């Protein structure tokens, strides 16, 4: 496995090794910044669209409130079958998607993780992350 791009070019492209980890049913961990400046880290379902990273949450969640104040994120993911293979993405939220378009993405992620559409049909939104840096590694 090669290392991905560490410094963000103008239009950063996720490398194949980073994308493979993000598009598999691996649990990622998302870190946001709490109001007091401390880290807030939670497990999430994740996927990609073009060269952006997608995840879902409730619009009233702690992470959503953190992102409304500060859009910076750090995300790590490890291969569920080979935990020594991992990727890291740092970036910032550039968009939220709700309504039918959001539910189509949420159901696509849910099919990957649990094999069926997302079971809770309310109170969810998709966040879109523009990566600033991303890389993968294996040890």
Image (cartoon, rainbow, N blue to C red):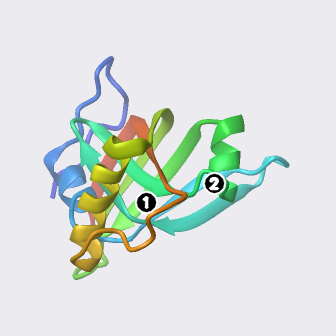
Of residues 114 and 102, the one drawn nearer to the viewer in this rendering: 102
Callout 2: SS = helix
State the image quarter where residue 137 is shown: bottom left
Specify the label residue 76 is tagged with: 1
Instruction: Pinpoint residue 12: horizontal percent, then vertical percent.
Output: 29, 28
Quadrant of the frame with the N terminus:
bottom left
User: Gap in Å between the C-alphas at discs 2 and 1?
Assistant: 15 Å
Residue at (69, 57) in percent of width and height:
62
Q: Left or right? Give the position of 68 relative to 14.
A: right
Q: Residues within 10 Å of mark 2 (few under 14, many from 20)?
A: many
Residue at (41, 43) in percent of width and height:
99
**Does residue 74 lie above or below 71 as drawn?**
below
Circles 2 and 1: CB distance less than 8 Å?
no
Callout 1: SS = strand
State the image quarter where residue 119 is shown: bottom left
Q: Can residue 129 be seen in this view?
A: yes
Of residues 84 and 96, the one drawn nearer to the viewer in this rendering: 96
Residue at (50, 61) in percent of width and height:
122
Residue under circle 2?
63
């Amino acid at each position: 496995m090669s290392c991905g791009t560490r410094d963000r070019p103008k239009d950063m492209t996720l490398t194949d090794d980073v994308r493979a980890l993000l598009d598999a049913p691996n649990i990622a961990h998302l870190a946001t910044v709490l109001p007091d400046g401390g880290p807030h880290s939670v497990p999430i379902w994740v996927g990609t669209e073009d060269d952006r990273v997608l995840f879902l949450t409730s619009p009233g969640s702690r992470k959503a409130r953190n992102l409304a104040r500060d859009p910076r994120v750090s995300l790590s993911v490890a291969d569920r079958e080979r935990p020594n293979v991992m990727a890291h993405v740092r970036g910032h939220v550039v968009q939220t998607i709700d309504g039918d378009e959001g539910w189509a993405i949420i159901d696509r992620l849910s099919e990957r993780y649990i094999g069926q559409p997302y079971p809770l049909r309310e109170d969810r939104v998709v966040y879109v992350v523009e990566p600033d840096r991303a890389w993968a590694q294996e040890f």
